[in-house]
Amino acid sequence: MFASSRFTVHRRAVAVAGTAAALALTLAACGSSGGSSSMPGMDHGTMPSASSSQSASPSMGDMPGMDHAADGNGLSDTQDGYRLTSKDATLPSGEQAAYRFTVTGPDGKPVTGFALDQTKRMHFYAIRSDLTGFQHIHPTMASDGTWTADLASLAPGSWRTFASFTPDSGAGKGKDFVLSRTVTVPGNATKTPLPAAATTAEVDGYTVTVKGEPMAGMAHPLTVTVSKDGKPVTDLQPYLDTYAHLTAFHEGDQAFAHLHPTTKVTGDNGGPDLAFHAELPTSGNWRLFLQFQTGGKLHTAALTLHVG
């Protein structure tokens, strides 16, 4: 489900033998464990940044950004000459924190021109190693190319931060990127077991149901249905130019996948069914986070999906 350069799945129609039908996409979500409800997906204002972030020094060992993994999963801080850099190797526990970072281009200079993607020039995600504490933020950029993401309270442990963007000039113009680094939150870290795979999730009184059986490396249609008190929900409001925003992380390595519903926004009210195109590259358990909005309030549902 990663689009090649960006590990994101772009809306696209897949031809089915003998029929021109759009494969529906899927994925769903679940309210994050511990602390995700307070901030997922909300825009957070940024404080002016003092200077561009720089790559962590070799002395940091396995501190942020030092891990380079295979292309297509968001687990590297570099791709095609673009690099995600930050001086922040640690962040405080139990309080809001400003994470500052910079994207540099093949010329080594900070990139300041970014194209809009789902109404934003930068999507920033944070997830702990046990796939709890999900945060989706839209940071702001200073004139020197430094971005600031205001994170909500973080629990002790190892976290991975992802920057999802598309340059609007230079060698990478029009290409989608997802780069990441790790950051440590000091303290006594307690691992939360990943919830078992399920087809439904509850959040804020809503029930999210996922139908479909995706298989690794293959495109499969998935359908997400939103209901409340046993009744279909038809008042989903547009959020980031869609009726639902879906992000997924792979158990064990935190590999990233970003899926968009194929259901088009046709007005101020959507639902109850949302079609997705699921193409998860790796087998195993994926933690899905589905964000949708009703009555001006953003909800984040989380659930575990097993991919064979």
Image: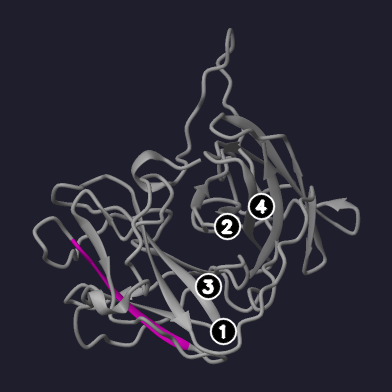
Mark 2 is on which residue type? Answer: Gly
Mark 1 is on which residue type? Answer: Pro
If the image is split into quadrants, where does the C terminus sit? top right
Dot placed on the residue nearer the N-terminal end, 3 or 1 = 3
Look at discs 1 and 4 and give the one toward the viewer.
Answer: 1
Position of residue 297 measured from the top left corner of the image (x, y, whole percent): 65, 71
Mark 3 is on which residue type? Answer: Met
Dot placed on the residue nearer the N-terminal end, 1 or 4 = 1
Estimate the spatial distance between the alpha carbons at disc 4 and disc 3, rounded to whole Å: 20 Å
Q: What mark, if any, has residue 269 been given in the picture? A: 4
Estimate the spatial distance between the alpha carbons at disc 1 and disc 4, rounded to whole Å: 39 Å
Q: Residue furthest right?
A: 230
The correct choice, above or below, for 187 with respect to 73 in the image is below
Q: Picture quarter containing residue 41?
A: bottom right
Q: Nearer the viewer, residue 133 or 243?
A: 133
Query: Going by the image, does 212 lie left or right of 239?
Result: right
Reading the image, the residue beneath label 2 is: 252
The correct choice, above or below, for 232 with respect to 154 in the image is above
The magenta-colored residue range is 97-104
Q: Is residue 119 magenta?
A: no
Estimate the spatial distance between the alpha carbons at disc 2 and disc 3, rounded to whole Å: 27 Å
Q: Are marks 4 and 2 in contact (CB under 8 Å)?
A: no
Q: Are marks 3 and 1 in contact (CB under 8 Å)?
A: no
Q: Are marks 2 and 3 in contact (CB under 8 Å)?
A: no
